[in-house]
Amino acid sequence: MTEERTVEPLLEPREGIPPVIADAAGLATVVARFAAGGGPVAVDAERASGYRYGNRAYLVQLRRAGAGTALIDPVGCPDLSALDQAVADAEIVLHAASQDLPCLMELGFRPREMFDTELAGRLLGYERVGLGTMVETVLGLRLEKGHSAADWSTRPLPEDWLRYAALDVEVLVELRDVLHLQLAESGKLEWAREEFAAVLNTPPPVPRSDPWRRTSGIHKVRNVRALAIVRELWTMRDRIAREADLAPGRVLPDAAIVTAALEGPRTKKALTEISAFTGRSARRHMSDWLAAVARARTLPDSQLPQPSTPGDGPPPPNRWADRDPAAAKRLAAARAVVSALADELHMPTENLLQPDAVRRLTWEPPVEITDESVTARLRELGAREWQLSLAAHPIAKALARLEPRGER
């Protein structure tokens, strides 16, 4: 019989809930404290996704040995470059770094060296890698995670929210230390370092040329005139949301845009009969919505959007068998290799090799399939050196097996 592990609830920060720093004098004190501290710096950020426009940070939490914990209000302290300089030589410990790095960089906080506890957990094969689960599984401590989806733009922030925020960085360095040891013992530490560097060096995504095409439910809209209604309503909603600093979905839900596109209302009465337009925020802008629909209806045919825009990559894999059966076989073979390797190494397939790289390689493979050509192509597609050392040869071997000698 397996003995159950005792889990201890983590209820209060060791030094209590620190005050929220919201002015230059307070920030200067924090900068001096963290400059004098030692070791890695645990960092977290809270946003107001789903409430506010964009993904800016509304609270930044930090903890370092010798410095304690600091809670910083980026509304009052929008420039953290001095703090960034104070800890420039330190390793920054984050959980799910790709989520927090963009909003931290907006504040002038740019880690040079990083440890991502979520990514480390993935490489180590942990089945669940949320911070609360990792802290409980690895350290035997239970974090309460009740405020992760809160509106962190709220002022003043409630005390229980601040307690939650401080606890998020309370044991992050301890978690890092155990995971670092496990990575070293499993021979995966250098792999992790390459992954952390890749996350840090990933450029921001290029803005989509037609962001309105990501409207949820747009697949129901088949007519190009109706697509124009989606585009005009989406654009109007985005302008209103930006000006009001509200999440677009709080101004008008996607379902309202799609329904209006399908029904093409011509009057305010017809618009109000669409249930998704009955929300308070939507009702305030009825004239704007109706004008957007009317504008779409009167556009000349030459200005109507096309049903879809060609992407820069391969089609969805479920279409490969019809469009290019040979490519479908290559994809199946490469996926089988990656899956088997990932199982052997106890990690998710997507962390062993990015699925997009596998698709692009197998849709348009090198003219000659060799270890060198497959390695070069995967490197072009962003694969890291550790991934290439493990996956390039077996993938090349599997693909070469599908290529009759003398053909291609």
Image: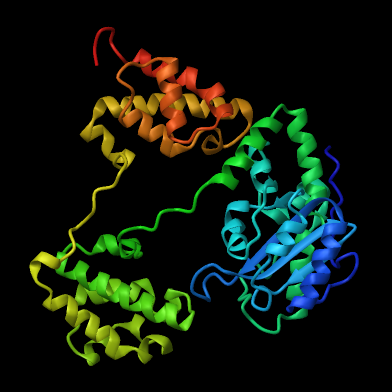
Location of residue 343 with respect to 225 vertically, above or below: above
In the drawing, does residue 21 fall left or right of residue 257?
Answer: right
Is residue 68 visible in the rendered structure shown here? no
Which of the two residues, 267 or 33, is positioned nearer the viewer here?
33
Q: Quadrant of residue 250?
A: bottom left
Task: Single out the residue that lies furthest toward the left.
Answer: 301
Q: Quadrant of the N terminus?
A: top right
Which of the two residues, 367 or 273, is positioned nearer the viewer here?
367
**How many numbered callouts?**
0
Which of the two residues, 67 or 185, is positioned nearer the viewer here?
67
In the drawing, does residue 322 fall left or right of residue 91?
Answer: left
Location of residue 117 with respect to 396 vertically, above or below: below
Residue 337: x %, y % from top left: 48, 24
Q: Quadrant of residue 389?
A: top right
Residue 272: x %, y % from top left: 29, 89
In the drawing, does residue 143 fall left or right of residue 406?
Answer: right
Task: Single out the residue that lies furthest toward the top.
Answer: 405
Q: Residue, x 35% and y 80% (percent of image)? A: 276
Q: Residue, x 73% and y 74% (percent of image)? A: 161
Q: Residue, x 37% and y 78% (percent of image)? A: 239
Is residue 124 visible in the rendered structure shown here? yes
Q: Quadrant of the C terminus?
A: top left
Residue 95: x %, y % from top left: 67, 53
Location of residue 134 with respect to 184 vertically, above or below: below
